[in-house]
Amino acid sequence: MDKIVIHGGKALVGSVRIGGAKNAALPILVSSLLTDGWCTYENVPHLRDIESIKQLLTHLGAEVETDGHTVRINAAGLSNHEAPYDLVRKMRASILVLCPLVARLKKARVSLPGGCAIGARPINFHLKGLTLLGADIDLDHGYVDASAKTLVGNEIFFDIPSVTGTENLLMAAVLAEGTTILRNAAREPEVVALIDVLNLMGSKIKGAGTSILTIQGVKKLRPVHVSIIPDRIETGTFMVAAALTKGSIEIKDCEPDHVTGIIHKLRQTGTEVSIKGKKIYVKGSKTIQSIDIKTLPYPGFPTDMQAQFMVLMAIAGGLSIISETIFENRFIHVSELRRLGADITVSGNAAMIKGVPSLSGAPVMATDLRASASLILAGLVAKGTTEVNRIYHLDRGYEAIEKKFQKLGADIERIQ
């Protein structure tokens, strides 16, 4: 199994290009199931999760072709309504095929998903919403069986905003009869990106970027040719890397409007952040100020950046508190950061971080995707050598991150 070895202490300097957003690419690739003909998607990142979804789409009967960062999918031959455990267990986002299958084939059998150990992330929102659209749902031996002769529009309210729940039900509602209204829907840029693609296909969705989405069902959708939006979490990770190492980084091909919450918090730490078009310039401060953070649904501070900011606070001056309101098990990385010398105390959904002068390299174990990134960042600033093991999590969401850090001057390598 691969590991990443880092000899820390070098300020990162240079330019880095941001790749396509995994969390936008996954539902957009799945949306190809809603139409016949070849859909073309550019700027698709090379990630383990992307490979998993392509395997699943192929299993369902779609043709999938990949050329570099371009993926072409033709679901004209969609014939298989079952998404088996062996394919779905690798990634929670696989549940996104549920609604497109019901919309196209009138039935679906999808294994309950797996993924990272950062919380339950139940799919009850998906199932309740699909039931309100007229589907019959049965849970049997770890599978969701859903069927509907006809999907009919309805009003659906989310108790809390759900990104995948919103995305899944959008893909059911676009081919349902009549009008569907999603209330308290997720507002994330990845949801907006999916809406943009569905509307290019011929859907009639209003309210993108707001908590109320109105969908007028149509009978048929057409293929599209689109580019995947930049990854805002990769953007934020490199921003924190510059602040941590007291370096200076130019971040290219990003979308600054998607990371305003991250920029705001970084500036509070004393980090210099400037924007020019689709570029962000980040320069670390000699002294890092401690700040408090509370994760919230978009446009609040993203839970996917919590672990990275915890590393920054670990070497900041003073005391900071990070409150996690999205996932209940997202402090698993704390024990590994302690191994590097961080002073962190966890109580319920809050972590209290007392800044220390420096971190010290040690062997650590990654537990989930964003925890992996936080350990890489910690290794970049720690004195001595840090070994990050079990990095297959990292490959689910960051494309060749060690090579990007190498180009910025980091002493980092992947060892097989």
Image (cartoon, rainbow, N blue to C red):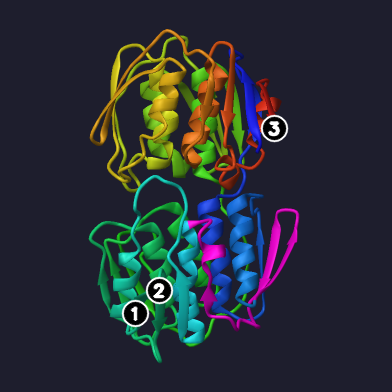
Mark 1 touches mark 3? (CB < 8 Å): no
Cα–Cα gap, marks 1 and 2: 7 Å
Residue receiving disc 2: 144
Q: Is residue 287 above or below residue 106?
A: above
Q: Gap between marks 3 and 2, in whole Å?
A: 40 Å
The residue drawn where x is 56% and y is 57% is 25
Q: Position of residue 141 (x, y in %)?
A: 40, 72
> What amino acid type is highlighted by mark number 2?
Val
Q: Is residue 78 magenta?
A: yes
The amino acid beneath tag 1 is: Ile
Does the segment drawn in magenta span residue 219? Answer: no
> Which sits in the foreground, 2 or 25?
2
Q: Earlier in the sequence, mark 3 or mark 2?
A: 2
Which residue carries the number 3 mark? 403
Q: Quadrant of the C terminus?
A: top right
Element type at marker 2? Answer: strand
Residue at label 1? 137
Q: Name, please, the residue furthest toward the front.
A: 141
Provide residue 407's location: percent of width, then percent of height. 70, 27
Give the residue type that dot 3 points to.
Lys
Q: Is residue 134 left or right of residue 33?
A: left
Within the image, what quadrant is residue 135 found in? bottom left
